[in-house]
Image (cartoon, grey):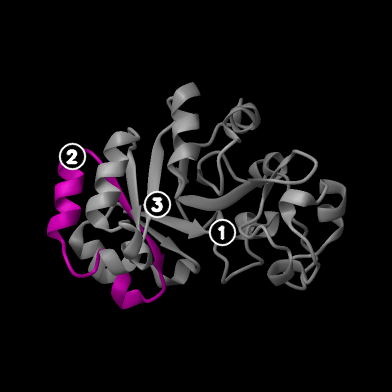
């Protein structure tokens, strides 16, 4: 079972920063990071499009040039919003990278950044279009993200599994609430060839239960949970 550091283990360092992945590297098998395009076109590592929660600044990442983003500080730390290429340079080769694409339209630039990267890379997204674009130009393994809060939109377990098949995914990334009540659905997905990586696991008891259920990976904000 793999331990995957959510946003670089966000409980241990400012999320999605170079410091976060450096701290997490010794404790996890893979780091998960969020990638989006900023206003000047570069791919940056940042979960939110709006800047306020992370930096206190106004505006959107998608409308802000990287020169401005670089001057902001994440969660009152000394860390800035990093370029994807810069953050990847801080991840040891033996540690995998789960790149979560926050929107479509980045596949070509993503592959250019990943060219020559020695790490194992998994690309995940909630957005089917983002995964379709990557599959069209690459054989990188893909993971489809889904959770029970979107059940009203049809994004429950059955939908997630069907969508993962259609997208030619290697992995399912369901939220923890979809997994703790049934080991059968996990086993069936694995029989179809999918790895099951569960997010975001916050309690040791939940981690133990999911391990007993045979999941392939736990996505955590704190490596101590596992």
The residue labelled by disc 2 is 192
Name the residue rendered at 64%, 27% in the picture: 112
Is residue 121 visible to the viewer in this orientation of the structure? no
Within the magenta stretch, is there residue 189? yes
- Give left or right: position of 56 versus 184: right
Mark count: 3
Point out residue 192 in the picture as x, y percentages from the top left corner.
Answer: 18, 39
Point out residue 168 in the picture as x, y percentages from the top left corner.
Answer: 32, 32
Q: Which residues are magenta?
A: 179-207
Element carrying mark 1: loop
- Counting residues from the N terminus, which is met first, the one under dot 3 or under dot 2? 3
- Counting residues from the N terminus, which is met first, the one under dot 1 or under dot 2? 1
Is residue 124 visible to the viewer in this orientation of the structure? yes
> Compared to 62, does 53 lie above or below?
below
The residue labelled by disc 1 is 7
Mark-to-mark CA distance, 1 and 2: 28 Å
Taking depth in this image into account, of 66 and 13 the one nearest to the observer is 66
The residue labelled by disc 3 is 145
Element carrying mark 3: strand
Q: Answer yes or no: do the residues labelled 1 and 2 have beta carbons within 8 Å?
A: no
Mark-to-mark CA distance, 3 and 2: 17 Å
- Give left or right: position of 92 versus 79: left
Q: Answer yes or no: do the residues labelled 3 and 2 have beta carbons within 8 Å?
A: no
Name the residue rendered at 52%, 52% in the picture: 31
Mark-to-mark CA distance, 3 and 1: 15 Å
Name the residue rendered at 87%, 48% in the picture: 67
């Amino acid at each position: 079972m793999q331990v995957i550091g959510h946003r670089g283990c966000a409980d241990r360092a400012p999320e999605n920063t170079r410091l976060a992945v450096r701290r997490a590297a010794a404790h996890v098998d893979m780091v998960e990071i969020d990638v989006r395009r900023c206003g000047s076109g570069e791919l940056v590592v940042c979960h939110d499009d709006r800047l306020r929660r992370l930096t206190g600044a106004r505006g959107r990442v998608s409308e802000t040039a990287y020169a401005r983003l670089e001057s902001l500080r994440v969660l009152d730390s000394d860390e800035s919003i990093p370029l994807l290429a810069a953050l990847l340079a801080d991840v040891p080769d033996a540690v995998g990278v789960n790149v979560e694409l926050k929107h479509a339209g980045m596949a070509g630039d993503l592959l250019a950044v990943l060219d020559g990267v020695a790490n194992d890379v998994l690309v995940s997204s909630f957005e089917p279009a983002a995964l379709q674009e990557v599959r069209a130009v690459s054989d990188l393994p893909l993971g489809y993200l889904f959770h029970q809060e979107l059940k009203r939109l049809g994004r429950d377990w059955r939908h997630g599994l069907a969508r993962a098949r259609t997208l030619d995914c290697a992995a399912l990334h369901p939220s923890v609430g979809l997994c703790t009540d049934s080991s059968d659905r996990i086993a069936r997905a694995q029989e179809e060839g999918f790895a099951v990586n569960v997010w975001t696991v916050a309690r040791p008891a939940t981690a133990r239960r999911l391990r007993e259920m045979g999941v392939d990976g736990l996505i955590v904000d704190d490596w101590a949970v596992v």
